[in-house]
Amino acid sequence: MTSGLWELVLKGVWVTIQLLFLSALLAGAVSFVVGIARTHRLWIVRFLAGFYTEVFRGTSALVMIFWVFFVLPPAFGWQLVPLWAGTLALGLTYGAYGSEIVRGALNAVDPAQKEGGIALSFTPWQRMKLILLPQAVPEMIPPFSNLLIELLKGTALVSIMGMGDLAFSGNLVRLALQESAEIYTYLLVIYFVIAFALTRIMRGLEKKLKAGVGKAPTRGISPQQELKRAETTGVGGGVA
Amino acid sequence: MKWDWGAVGDFMPQFWDGLLVTLQALALGSVISFVLGLVWALLMRAPTRWVTWPVGAVTEFVRNTPLLVQLFFLFYVLPEWGFTFSALTTGVFAIGLHYSTYTMQVYRAGIEAVPVGQWEAATALNLPVTRTWRVVILPQAIRRVVPALGNYVIAMLKDTPLLMAITVLDMLGQARLFSQEHFQFTEPLTVIGVAFILISYLASLLMRALERRLVH
Amino acid sequence: MSTDIQQSPDMNPADKRSNGELIRLDQVTKRFGDNTVLDHLDFSVEAGKHVTLIGPSGSGKTTILRLLMTLTKPDEGTITVDGQHLFPASDKEVREVRKKIGMVFQQFNLFPNMPVLRNITEAPVTVLGLSKDEAEERARELLDLVGLADKCDAYPAQLSGGQQQRVAIARALAMRPQVLLLDEVTSALDPELVAGVLDVLRDIARSTDITMLCVTHEMNFARDISDQVLMFDSGRIIEAGAPEKIFSEPEQDRTREFLSAVL
């Protein structure tokens, strides 16, 4: 491979990382807003949040990407920059999975904690902020770590729309070289290295957060969580 | 926003073709992932590191890299090595392989969840190892893993559109083909979007019913 | 201190079906981490005898049963059963010897995926090579013996704890073992179900010549069936003798303390 082609690949890596970062931010925001809304005391709020989750989990991320790229612009007159279109599609779909993580972790906090908060006459929002979230967030990190890896794999989907991410640059190199094994091997290794780095970062984060509430970090996820994993991380590049 | 029911009607014949391909890919991909995942899970319990280390490394690699790139790899590289398969065959194998690295963890969790007393009872009755696996451990592990496997089938359903990237005409492939021919994007994409939601919703109802039957 | 049962002065060999030593442990030591559960234990049992192991929990009683069933391995020492080595031994030798031994567990450990009858016939068919008909006939006899002839087709989860344990006893007996190991078989049962299980075991103790090694906290039961009672403490046998003697006039203070706590 020539240095020119490597440059192309590096540009692709940069686009992938940008897209990953932005869509992770959006997905994280959606996860918390929708996840907390699903524990709201008003049924209509719970219902709407649940409806959002079911719809966005029910469809395929790739179909969602097509929709954002092709249906939104004529329908609403928006023409989104590809990076933002990709961010929107990925952030909304993976956020739906993330909301399940948030809801599950909030519900797993000992009910006595909530009662304690009521006894101290905290408002619902104070209970959430001061009692529930600080205990629930550290528990969310391992499943969020899995979800982040799924999101990384999901970013490759935008290449189908012609966006110049890592997977797309790989296809260009294949055309230039007329040979596939080498470039796709590099591609897979690069994705794997990014995934590995993300896992490490998330583990460090978990350690830090759990130290804050006096718990030891778990090593990986338990068999019980493993059997629930598909529901909370969607799994696979194109799960919505 | 214009909605053209005529375009929906025109798309339907292609939609049914695409649905058939999607379901085909899903069924075959599921079977491959169930079988291969069990093979990985059992190999990971081998007593020697010479087996567990390579199996663990390969499956970890496959699980942490995009299915889309794996599809490209198999689709473009295998012919260079002299193996030529249809796009659908390649796609089904790629999906099955990718998801087998998830199902193996489900099996592992299921096997670990079988109480240690079951192993001890089998030892006390002097049952041979293979027999212990076949009639005692696996039947109990499988029962525990069915719901989780079902969720992966639903996840897999939502990954089948990726096959479009290697020329397979699944639902999304048909929708794109139709869009390019008629310059109508909204209707076909919305139809298949709704179809995915409906199928995965029905599938999850089915899973819940199955789960209830298995828990006793 | 270690004790050899045969040399115990309290035994009266005349009224026992004495046909030689069946189980022998020599200098067996078992540690879990820093915790020494069995400490250079010497111990033997004659064929046909019913031996009960008593003592505070954690004193190593259950570990002896688990060693004999090869569920765990000793760190030092040798174990022989019927003249054949169980430790150290090859896997093949272990399989051979293990056929002579049956075990009933505290938590029953029935296979929940099989009906009662299949739980009992599975091992005789696959391990001993009995025909299915033969194995089922034997299983029905045994179910009759434990009073559950009508439960052939039930699944373990449909039975009470006491019924499950009686099935587990039938399952162990179906292998025609020379030795039956009973590991706190009533500890996981509701009090009202204990008597039924113990009656079955009394029956078996009376009517067969099977060697029984029993860990239990049911002292009346121990008194009824035992030829020999061994008091364990901290991985050693501190006292051994006929049940009448151990229960009425123990020599060791530790035994007295233990008995007054449980009786």
Image: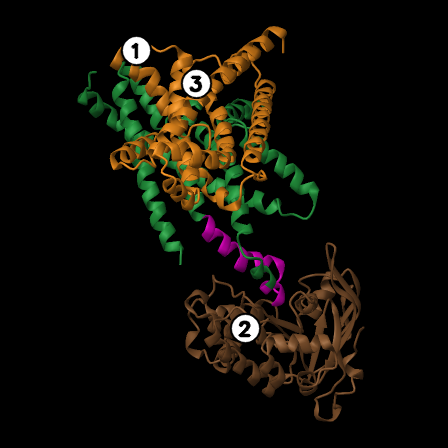
Chain colours: A orange, B green, C brown
Residue C186, numbered label: 2
Subunit that carries the residue with mark 3: A
Residue C128 left/right relative to C30: left
Rendered view: C168 above or below C7 = above
What's the residue type where badge 1 is placed?
Answer: Trp
Subunit that carries the residue with mark 1: A
What's the residue type where badge 2 is placed?
Answer: Thr
Location of the N terminus of chain B (image quadrant): top left
Q: What crowding class fits label 1: few (fewer than 14 Cα within 10 Å), some (14-19), or many (20 or more)? A: few
Q: Which residue is at a point 58% across and 82% down the rendered structure image?
A: C220
Say which of C215 and C84 sits in front.
C215
Residue C102, picture quadrant: bottom right
Residue C48, picture quadrant: bottom right
Location of the C terminus of chain B (image quadrant): bottom left
**Element under disc 3:** helix
Pointer 1 with pointer 2, Cβ within 8 A: no
Residue A78, numbered label: 1
Q: What crowding class fits label 2: few (fewer than 14 Cα within 10 Å), some (14-19), or many (20 or more)? A: many
Residue C123, numbered label: none
Subunit that carries the residue with mark 2: C
Q: Nearer the viewer, mark 2 or mark 3?
A: 2
Say which of A146 and B66 sits in front.
A146
Rendered view: A72 above or below B168 = above
Between marks 2 and 3, how big is the CA–CA gap? 64 Å
Rendered view: C258 above or below B18 = below
Q: Where is residue B62 drawn, in percent x and y?
A: 56, 31
Between marks 3 and 1, how big is the CA–CA gap? 18 Å
Residue A158, numbered label: 3
